[in-house]
Image: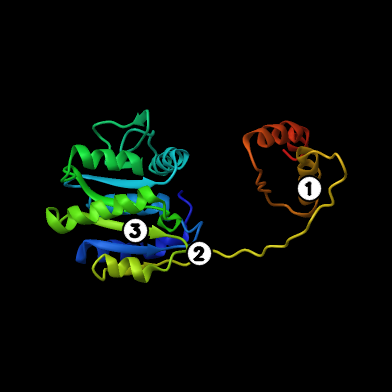
Amino acid sequence: MTLSLPVDDVLSDLTSALQRSNSVVLKAPAGAGKTTRVPPALLDRGFAESGQIVMLEPRRIAARTSAARIACERGERTGQTVGYRIRFEDCVSRETKILVVTEGVLLRRIQDDPFLEGISVVVFDEFHERRLDSDLALAMVRRIQLTVRPDLRIVVMSATMEPGPIADWLGGCPIVESLGRLFPVKIEYLRRVDRQSISELVTSGVETALARTDGDVLVFLPGVGEILRCRTDLEATARRHD
């Protein structure tokens, strides 16, 4: 059974708005589920009958993992209905209806296909990050929509950006807002002993946290090296806590 997420409550509003207008702005907090739930909702409402639903992700790892998660929730392997294409790598097939890409991939496609034939919806995820490539991609897709493809639909999704200005720029399009889930957060600081490594500090912190909660512990670290060292140092702890 698929876990319910906050954005599920507004998916009907979103798809209905996109049927009335060729553009929609969705504001949904981080964790609301917009990345994994919006493209399938568009697919299920028939928006991919005349072309693919293409979703832009700002990073390659996000494109891969988003596609994998959407495919998993549909009980499929990546590359069937849901695929991805990033620089030097793709996982797609003739069945692919939802394609997750990075901005550079879309910009190259616009160069090769100025009308974006074969694409029915372009979804801009995490647009609040405001990268040059994403701004350029949106400007070019909007120009195509205004000049030769009024049927081309645009969905702009953001967690934190004020939706009004971008909705105005998209011709006064509808705005749909989703609530998030709030959880209580308690902040404590561990005292770091001289010459103590990050992995030793993290191991101590995780042990302390696990002693105080029955839940899980999420650890943020600055780089791959620290992640790998902490994973090794926490193996014994993980076995004790199953």
Residue 191 image position (x, y, % from top left): 84, 52
Horizontally, residue 99 falls left or right of residue 186, namely left
Given residues 230 and 39, the one toward you in this image is 230
**Does residue 22 appear anywhere in the picture?**
yes
Q: Viewed as shown, does residue 189 lie left or right of 160?
A: right
Q: Secondary structure at mark 2?
A: loop
Disc 1 designates what residue? 205
Place of residue 13 in the rendered image (x, y in percent of width and height, measured from the top left): 32, 66
Residue 78 - label: none
Q: Secondary structure beneath disc 3?
A: strand
Query: What residue did someone put label 3 on?
Result: 156
Q: Can residue 150 be spotted in the picture?
A: no
Q: Earlier in the sequence, mark 2 or mark 3?
A: 3
Q: Is residue 70 above or below residue 152?
A: above
Amino acid beneath label 3: Val
In the image, what residue type sits under mark 1?
A: Gly
Q: Nearer the viewer, mark 1 or mark 3?
A: 3
**Residue 99 against residue 213 in the figure, above or below:** above
